[in-house]
Amino acid sequence: MSRKAIETKGNDVGYSPAARIFLMLFFAVLAILILIPLYALLLGTFKGGAELFVSGLNLDPTPEKLHLRAWRYLFTGIMSNGEYQPHDYFIWYKNSFLLVLVQGTLTLLISSMVAYGFSKYQFRGKNVLFLCVLLVMMIPLEILMLPMYTQINAMGLRDSYAGVMLPFLANMSAIFFFKQFLEGVPGDLLDAGRVDGCTEYGIFFKIIMPIMKPAYASMAVLVGMGAWNGLLWPLLVISSMDKYTIPLGLNTLFTPYGNNYDLMITGSCFAILPLLLLYLLAQRFIIEGMTAGSVKG
């Protein structure tokens, strides 16, 4: 069989023209449904708090109602009436960014090392320990919060970022994902590294980690989203306002004495940007991980 025939056969997934048109329409409708809330959020940032209080988030793009006063308040602290009212939004932003950077890096490193041990080493109790990993994945975070908080408090880590990050550095979902990915890496590759004089750590850092780039990219998006959007656990641990992250800070805008809709809506929209950039940067590796294998023959 010629190369062209093989490629043609490989590209033919067996869908009829009608089925392809249906799938295109289905995914187009799905994309529109996903984008509508984002459009409403973005449109709300150009209407301001007074309009949102009256009509809420909607899809009405009336030009007379659109302005940049909410965005000006976000970046300068100058309100729509011309008064200067400082806010701590960019302090929250910096705190969230540093937390995601440190927690994401450590989580990917520690979780991948644990998964590597489960995948490529044989030791007593291995199956029992991995079963514990699966069981912890099934337990909701709300059930674990009380013992976690008690432990963090006993360690003196309350009101610190270490207390926020420590319980999640060995992420059970990441461990499971990385282990399944590493199952496709042949053991001969590791043996070749040992023959060449690599230490066990050298094998991991020089051989395994480059292979795991697609897996790292996929899990970085999920871990980053979890750390960036975390509210309930940081709310229990953090008590100092100068350590608030974006979800905690925006939550303080809801008070019995009034709500700062201008900062809340623009701050929520601007907070999406890092996650969007993270996904766009990791998209190539995510697609590579889904379409290619961990090792190309």
Image (cartoon, rainbow, N blue to C red):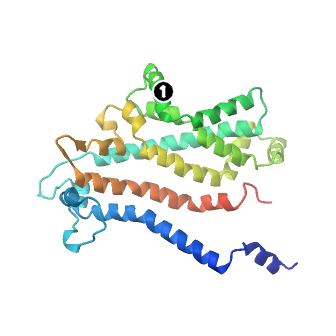
Residue 259 can be seen in this image = yes
Which structural element holds mark 1?
helix
> Is 279 in front, or is 12?
12
> Does 138 sit left or right of 156 as displayed?
right
Q: In this figure, which residue is indicated by the disc labeled 1?
A: 148
> Is 59 in front, or is 167?
59
Tell me which residue sits at (61%, 50%) in the image: 216
Tell me which residue sits at (22%, 41%) in the image: 255
Amino acid under disc 1:
Met
Spot occupied by residue 5 in the image (x, y as percentages of width and height): 81, 79
Spot occupied by residue 206 in the image (x, y as percentages of width and height): 70, 47
- Where residue 60 sits, quadrant-wise, is bottom left
Residue placed farthest to the top in the image?
154
Spot occupied by residue 213 in the image (x, y as percentages of width and height): 64, 53
Q: How many marks?
A: 1
> Does 149 sit left or right of 126 as displayed?
left
- Where residue 164 sits, quadrant-wise, is top left
Within-10-Å neighbours for mark 1: few <14, some 14–19, many 20+: some
Tell me which residue sits at (55%, 49%) in the image: 220
Spot occupied by residue 199 in the image (x, y as percentages of width and height): 75, 37
The correct choice, above or below, for 48 with respect to 90 in the image is below
Residue placed farthest to the right in the image?
1
Q: Quadrant of the N terminus?
A: bottom right
> Is 251 in front, or is 267?
251
The correct choice, above or below, for 187 with respect to 70 in the image is above
Tell me which residue sits at (45%, 19%) in the image: 154
> Does 150 sit left or right of 119 as displayed?
left
Q: Quadrant of the C terminus?
A: bottom right
The correct choice, above or below, for 49 with respect to 133 in the image is below
Residue 109 can be seen in this image = no
